[in-house]
Amino acid sequence: MRTDCWSAISSHFALETVEKCVKETLTGHPGDCRHIAVAPAKLKAGLAGQHAVTRQDIASLVLAHPDCNTLDDGEKHLFAWLFANHLLPSDAIIVTTADKAALVASHGLGWLDCTTSLEDLAHQAGVGRTNLAALALQYREDWLSSIKIKIRMGIIP
């Protein structure tokens, strides 16, 4: 990460994700100025778990919550795994995403209160103010709070 907070976050939290999110993180879109190259070994070393998602998991999510069909693949796979394993809502598990559609879907699933910002995770992990200030807007707590309010008010359907 440009803010170099991956090591702090992955040392402080037991991070788990799905294979599709790892693949997207490692490939990304190199031409996109927002793309952050991550060393595969560093990424995988920081994960406590990397989970496979089946087509049945995805189908079950989409059949129960059709709006989830429009999610980007990474979010769709992550939500399918969480849904299939009945992991949310929970006080022990949190999800971070900077994707508005995923946040809207999390609300429909009853999971919106289980989402947090990357900034909040980094702050809890002891990342300094300078690095926190370098986070892009969509990773900030104030952005997430604003989106959550708009979702709850129905401004973002």
Image (spheres, helix red, strand yellow):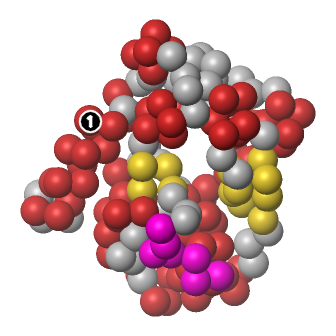
* Residue that lies at the very extreme toward the top in this rendered image: 130
Give percent across and percent down for residue 107: 32, 69
**Who's the residue at 33% across and 37% down the image?**
141
**The N terminus appears in which quarter of the rendering?**
top right
User: Is residue 89 magenta-colored?
Assistant: yes
| Amino acid beneath label 1 | Asp
Give percent across and percent down for residue 133: 40, 16
**Who's the residue at 12% across and 64% down the image?**
154
Taken as a whole, is the magenta stretch helix, strand or loop?
loop
How packed is label 1: few (under 14 Cα within 10 Å), some, or many (20 or more)? some
Give percent across and percent down for residue 18: 72, 60
Q: Which residues are magenta?
A: 85-91
Closer to the camera in the image, 99 or 46: 46
Is 99 rendered above or below residue 59? above
Is 110 rendered above or below residue 23? below
**Who's the residue at 85% across and 39% down the image?**
45
SS state under label 1: helix
Give percent across and percent down for residue 83: 56, 79
Quarter occupied by residue 25: top right
* Residue that lies at the very extreme toward the right in this rendered image: 41
Q: Is residue 68 visible?
A: no
Write down the residue under mark 1.
Answer: 142
Quarter occupied by residue 145: top left
